Image (tube, coloured by chain):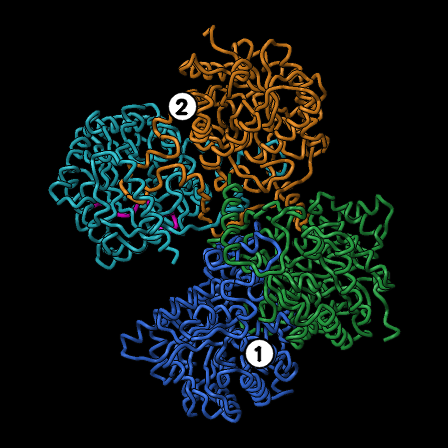
Chain colours: A blue, B green, C orange, D cyan
C-alpha cells in the first residue's frame, strides 16, 4: 500500500472519480433515517455500508469516502438523537473508516483512497463561536488520523466562514484537504459570492476546491465555473472538485434542493439518467475539473457513466462495465428487435426522457423561508421536536406559502 | 421451520407482501447486464444478491423470490449468451434458491417463504411447440423441487397459451402455483382478453392469479379488476396477485414499458414515490388482492410503503420502518424548520411531485412494431447479434417511427 | 342565389367546411358574456358579429352559421337573464340570420350557405317534458324558416332524447337537418352509447349526423368513428359531420371540457395550433366525414388550415391563404435567416410545441360532479344566482374535490 | 378635442393603458401575412383594422396605436415585398393614422390618444449608416405629423444605437416621445446592458422609456426593473412603459421569442390567461410603471384584465367589463352548478392551468444562431428569397441545431 499514489499526485496526473451518495441510497434500502441521516449505520449495518462502497468501487470510484456525513458530536445529539451517547462520535467515525478501508483495499490499481469527511455543524447554525465549532471538527479529524485515512474532505457547508474554520482544523494534520461547499451560483447563505467562497477556501489552505450537494450537475458546473474564474483572477490554482446531486433542480433557489417541496421523499422524477452523467462528466472535464464525483442521488450506474465517459482519459473501463458495455451495448442481446435497435450511443445520447407524469408540473416553487444562521428559528436543540412544535411549524409553512404566492 | 405457514394459508388469513425487482436494481448496482438480464449473478455475485433479498426482507416482504428470472436454458444460450454452457441452468437455479432460502431464514415470524419462478421462453417466442417449451420449464422446476422451495411462480408471460403450459408443468409438483402475466387491460399479445387470461390460468390450475411487470401499479389494478370480474363471472375463486412496475406508464400500449423509448436506460423520471405505493397498496387491498408486491423498479422503500400502508391489516410494521416512521416521521429530527414542517401524512399524501425536467414531455409515443409470436423478426438466435443486424434494426426503427407519426 | 347548391348536394359532391366558434371568440373581444353566452350580441354589436362571420368566410367556411347558440327563450330568461324580455327570442334569432346571410352573400362561388341552430334547453335539463321543450325549439325554427336559412342544425345536445325531439321539430320544415351531440366516446349523459346516439339521430330523420363541442378534434374523431361503425352496422348512411373544440382535452371525461377546472377562462394553453388542424382535417376526411368544421376555440386560422389541407379535394385555396401560403410560406420574407429556415411543411408538420409553462401540469382532474338531468342541482331558475347560493356551491365543490382525491 | 389631456399629463396623473398586438391578431384573422407582417392591411382591410382598434378601446385602452409596425419604406420593399411600390410608405402610414383616429374619437372621456410608431429598419440591420436610417424614420414621422397624432412611439428596437437615431428624428417634432426596446434582462444585441439602454434612451430625449415585445410580462418586468434602477442611479426620471408579449417565454434567451422554435405559428400553448394579466398589471403598477400595455399575443380580454385589475387606480371599469364582471362574475349565470362555483376571484387567482399537452415539453431550446448586425447573414435584400436560399438555410439550421445539442 506504501506505493499507492496520493490524491494530489493522482489529480496532477489525471482524473479522480469520486463516489456517490450514501444517505439517500441507504435510506431507500432501509438502513438510514431521513432527517437525522443516522451515520450510526456503520455500526448497526456494516455489511450494508460495505455493499454500497463496493458498488461504487466496481463502478469506477477512486475514492472510498467514509460514511461520516453529519457525524459530528453535536449532530449525533440533536433533536432527540441518542447516537452520541450510544455509540460516541469517535466510535462512529472510526467504524466508518474501517469499512471504507476494507473495501478500498479490494480495488485494483493498488486500491482506492480513503477519505474522512467533515460537514457543517448544528453548533454553527445555532450561533456557536469558532472555538466550540472547531472542537466538534477536531473530534472527527482525530478519529480520521487515527484511522489512517488518505485525505480529508470538508464538505456540505453553507457558510464560507464555517468551512474556513474546518479547513483550519484539517490543516493541522499533514493530509491533503479537499473543500466543497453546498452552494449554487448565488453563493453562500451570508451573501458571499461563489467566487469569493472559492478564493477564501483556497486561501485557508484547501488543496482542492469546489462544490457538492444541493444542486444538479449542470447548475453545479455553473458554480464551479464562477469559482474557477475568481480563482484565476486571484492567481490561485487549487485543483477543482465537483460532487453534485443526481437530482435535476432547475427550480432550486439559493438553499438548493432542501427548499424544494419534494425533498426528501418525492424526488424520484428528478433522478438523472446515466446519459445525463455522460454530459456532466464531459463538461466537468472540459472545464478543468479533475475530481469528479457525486452526492445525494448518485448511485453506482451514475458513477459508472462518468467512468465510461472518461475511459480514454483514464485508460480503462471500470469493472462494472462488464455488465453494461458503454452506451448500453448489452441490449444487442435483448429478445425484442426494437430494443436491440436501441443498442448504441446515437440512440441514448439524444434521448430526452418522458416523465410519465401528466399530472405533475415540471417545476416547483421552493419554500425559501429565508431562515439563515442568525435566525432564531434555526437554533438547534437536543430535545426531540414535540408534536406541538410540528403543528406550529405547519402553520408557519402555510403562512410562508401564501406569502410566496402573493 | 416445519411449522411455518404456507402461502395459501397465509393468503386465506391475510395479506402477503411480495418483494421488488431484481434485474433493474442489480443492473444499477453493476451486477446484472440489461438485455440478457444475466441471472448468473447468483453465482458471480452471491453477496450482492443476498444484500438485495435482505433489503426486501427488512422492508416487509413475506416472500423471497429466488432470482431466476429468464433463467431457462434456452435464454441462457440466446444471442451470444455463454451462461448455459458456463454455469448450466440447474446450477443457476439452485444457487438462486440457496441465496433466497438463506435470507428467508433470517426473517422473524418463522421466516419468509421462498419461491422459484419460471418466465416466458425464447423457444416459445421463436415458435417452438408445447413439448420443447415444457422441457425448458421442467429443468427449472426440477431444480426448484430439489431446492425445497415453498411455492412456484409462473410470471412474465405475454401469451396465455405459454403460461398454461408452464402451469401444467408446475402442477406436476405438489407445490402451490402462482401465475401472473405481464399484460395490461388490453389483454395478451394474441388478442385474448385480460379476463379470459385469468379464467384460463385458473382453469389450468393456478392457485393465485394476476399480473406482474410491464405496467404501472394503477394500470395493473385496472387489469386485475378485469380479471376479477371475469373470474367471478366464471365462478372461479383463486387468490389474486399483483406485482406491477414501479414506473409510471400512462403512455404504454399493449406491450407495456418495453415499447417505451426510455426502456430500459432512461426510465428514472417514471419511478414511483413511496407515496404512490401507499395509494396502490390500499387500492389493491380494497379490490380484494391479497398477494401484493412489485416488479421492475420496486426497491425496498417501495415495499416498505406497502407494509406501512397495511400495518393495521398485518398487525405489525416491518423492521425497516424503524428507519422511517410511517409518513416520513423521521423528519421531525431535521435541522431545517421548514423540512420538519413536512413530517406527516397530510403533507406527503397530497404531494404531486414536480419532475424537474422542463425539456421533457410527460408522455412518449411507444414503438409498437406490432411484432408478436409468429412474426419472423421475433425468432431468437443463439449467435450474438452482429453489427450489421443492429444497423438494419436501426433502419427498421426509423421507418416504423415515420409511420408512427403519419 | 337560386342556383346555389344546397347542403346535401355539396356533401354528395365533396367536402363542406363549417365555421368556427362564436361565443369564445366574441367573449375575448368583449361582446359576449361567458356564463349566459349572450346571443343578444347580434342586436347589440352586429358589426362585431359580422366581422367574425367574414373572417370565417375568408378562411374557407362554406357555411355561415347564424349566431343563435343558446338563444332559446327559456335560456334567455335563465338565472337573471333579461334578454328574453328585452329582445325576444324571435328578435334575436332573426337578427342572427340577417347577419349571417349578409356575409354569406359576400362569398365567392355563389355564396356560402346559412344555417340556423338549436341547442339543448334549460327546460329539458330541469325536467320539462317533450311538449314544453319542443315549444322552445319551435319558436327558433319558426324564426329560421321566416329568415330563409338554407338548413337547420341541432347541435350541442348531451342527451339523445332531447335531440330526437329537436330533430322532430326541424323535420316539420322541408330543410335539410344536421344533428350533432356534444358527446365523447363514452356516449350521452344517460348512458346511451355514442353509436346508439348516432343511430337514433339518423332514425329520427337527421340528414347529417355527428358531434360538436366538448372534446378536442382527436377525441371527437374517435367518437365519430364509433358512430360510423354503429350506423354501418344498422345499414344507415347519413352524411357525417364533426365540429370539435379547438382545445386539447385528453383529460376530459364524460362531460367534456365543462368539467375541466380551466373552463372557461384558463383554456389558453390548450388551444390547438393550425398544424393540429391539418392532421385533424386529413383524418376526418379519411374517415369519410364530409362536413368538417369547428366549435369553441376555433378561430379563422384554424378553419383556414382545414381549407389548406383539403385544397386538392376542394380544388381551391381560401381567400385568406393569400396572407399565409400553406405551411407558412410567408416566412420566406422574414428578416431573420433562422426564421426563414422555418418556411415549409417539413418544419411545421413535425413541430411539437413547448408550452412555456414549467409550473403547469399537462393534465387536470375534471370536476365530475356526476350531476345529470334528473338531479335536483341541475334544475334551472329564472332568478339570478344569489351570493349565498354561490357560497354554498363553493362548499359543495370543496367536498367533491376532497372526494375526488380520495 | 382640444381639451383632451395629453400623454404626459395623463401619466403624471395616473395610469395609461396601452393596446394589444395587431400583427398576430390580424394574422390569425386572415388579414396580415406572418413574415413581412404586411401593414398594408390598413389600406386593404380597413374595417378589419378598425374592428381590432375598437375591441381594444372597449377593453380599456387609452391609446390607439396606429398600425404602422414595420411600415418603413425599406421594409415595405424587402425580400420581394411590393408594398412600397404599390401603396407607398406615406400612404400606408397615413391610412393607419386615419383608422386609429376614427376609432379613438369613439371613446368616452374625451377619446383615446393616437400614436404613430417607428420600429427597427432593415437598413440598420444591413449595416446602413445614421443618415440612411434616419431618412427611413423621417418619412414615417412626417406622415405622423401630417396626420396629427398625439405622440410618437419608437418601439421594437434591438440595438440602442438605432433607437437613439430614431428618438433624434422624433424629437424634431414637438410631440411627446415614447421609446421601447424589445430587449430582455440581458440587454441589447450589441452587449449594452438593459440599464444602460434605458439611460441612453432617456438622455436621447425620450419622455417615456421601457420595453416592448420579445419577452413575456414577467421577464419584461425584470428588464424594466433593471432599467429603473439604472435611471435612478443616473438621476433620470422619465416615465416608464411596459408592453410585453402575451406569450410565456421562460425559455427565451437574448433574442427573445423569435428564436423559439415555435415562433410564429405554434405559440398557442404559451398564450397568457387573463389572470396572468392581473398579476402582471399589479406588479407593473407597483414597480412604478404608468404606461402599461401589451404587444404580440395581447388580445382584448388581456387588456380588459389590466383595466379590471387597475379599476380603483383608474376610477372606472372599461366598457367591455359589462360582458365579463371582474374575476369572471358572469359565471353565476351558467347552467351547470359546478361552473357557477367558479365565479369569483378566489378560484381564478390561484388557477394554475393544465396545458392539455402530454406530449409537449414545457420549454424549448432556442435557435440562438448568434447572428447580429454586422453578420453577413443578416443583410437584407429587396429580392424574394429563392428556394435555393431556403434550402441552404435549412442546412445551416440543421448544423446549428447539432451544435446546440453538443
Residue B155, quarter of the rendered image? bottom right
Q: Disc 1 designates what residue?
A: A54
Q: What residue occupies the far left of the structure in this picture?
A: D131
Q: Position of residue B388 (x, y in %)?
A: 50, 55
Residue B79, quarter of the rendered image? bottom right
Nearest the eye: A45 or D236: A45
Say if A360 sits above or below C58 in the image: below
Q: Which residues are magenta?
A: D206-219
Position of B270 with respect to D140 (left or right) is: right
Position of C195 with respect to A238 (left or right) is: right
Q: Disc 2 designates what residue?
A: C318
Position of A68 with respect to D153 (left or right) is: right
| Chain containing the residue with disc 2 | C
Q: Position of residue A43 (x, y in %)?
A: 63, 84
Q: Mark 1 falls on what kind of element?
A: helix
Q: Mark 2 falls on what kind of element?
A: loop
B285 within the magenta span: no
Say if A213 sits above or below D219 in the image: below
Q: What residue occupies the far top of the structure in this picture?
A: C2
Look at discs 1 and 2 and give the one toward the viewer.
1
The residue at 66%/64% (across/down) is B76
How many angstroms separate mark 1 from mark 2 (CA)?
A: 70 Å
Amino acid at each position: 500500500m506504501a506505493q499507492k499514489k496520493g490524491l494530489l499526485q493522482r489529480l496532477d496526473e489525471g482524473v479522480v472519480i469520486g463516489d456517490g451518495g450514501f444517505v439517500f441510497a441507504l435510506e431507500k434500502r432501509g438502513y438510514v433515517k431521513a432527517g437525522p441521516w443516522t451515520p450510526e449505520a456503520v455500526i448497526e449495518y456494516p455489511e450494508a455500508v460495505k455493499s454500497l462502497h463496493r458498488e461504487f468501487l466496481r463502478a469506477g470510484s477512486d475514492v472510498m469516502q467514509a460514511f461520516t456525513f453529519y457525524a459530528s458530536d453535536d449532530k449525533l445529539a440533536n433533536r432527540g438523537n441518542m447516537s452520541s451517547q450510544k455509540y460516541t462520535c469517535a466510535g462512529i467515525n472510526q467504524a466508518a473508516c474501517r469499512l471504507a478501508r476494507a473495501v478500498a483495499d479490494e480495488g485494483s490499481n493498488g486500491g482506492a483512497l480513503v477519505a474522512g469527511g467533515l460537514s457543517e455543524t448544528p453548533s454553527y447554525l445555532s450561533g456557536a463561536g469558532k472555538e466550540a465549532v472547531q472542537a466538534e471538527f477536531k473530534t472527527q479529524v482525530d478519529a480520521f488520523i487515527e484511522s489512517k485515512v488518505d485525505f480529508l474532505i470538508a464538505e456540505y457547508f453553507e457558510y464560507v466562514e464555517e468551512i474556513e474554520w474546518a479547513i483550519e482544523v484539517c490543516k493541522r494534520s499533514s493530509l491533503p484537504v479537499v473543500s466543497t461547499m453546498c452552494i449554487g451560483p448565488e453563493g453562500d447563505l451570508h451573501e458571499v459570492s461563489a467566487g469569493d467562497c472559492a478564493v477564501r477556501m483556497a486561501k485557508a489552505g484547501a488543496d482542492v476546491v469546489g462544490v457538492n450537494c444541493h444542486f444538479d450537475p449542470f447548475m453545479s458546473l455553473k458554480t464551479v465555473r464562477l469559482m474557477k474564474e475568481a480563482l484565476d483572477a486571484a492567481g490561485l490554482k487549487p485543483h477543482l472538485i465537483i460532487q453534485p446531486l443526481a437530482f435535476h433542480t432547475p427550480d432550486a433557489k439559493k438553499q438548493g434542493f432542501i427548499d424544494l417541496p419534494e425533498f426528501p421523499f418525492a424526488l424520484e422524477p428528478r433522478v438523472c439518467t446515466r446519459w445525463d452523467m455522460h454530459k456532466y462528466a464531459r463538461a466537468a472535464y472540459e472545464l478543468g475539473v479533475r475530481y469528479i464525483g457525486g452526492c445525494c442521488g448518485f448511485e453506482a450506474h451514475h458513477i459508472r457513466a462518468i467512468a465510461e465517459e472518461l475511459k480514454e482519459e483514464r485508460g480503462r473501463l471500470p469493472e462494472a462495465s462488464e455488465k453494461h458495455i458503454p452506451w448500453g451495448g448489452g441490449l444487442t442481446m435483448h429478445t425484442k428487435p426494437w430494443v436491440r435497435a436501441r443498442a448504441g450511443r446515437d440512440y441514448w445520447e439524444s434521448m430526452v426522457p418522458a416523465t410519465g407524469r401528466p399530472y405533475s408540473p415540471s417545476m416547483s416553487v421552493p419554500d425559501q423561508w429565508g431562515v439563515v444562521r442568525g435566525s432564531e428559528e434555526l437554533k438547534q436543540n437536543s430535545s426531540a421536536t414535540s408534536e406541538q412544535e410540528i403543528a406550529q411549524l405547519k402553520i408557519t409553512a402555510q403562512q410562508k406559502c401564501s406569502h410566496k404566492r402573493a
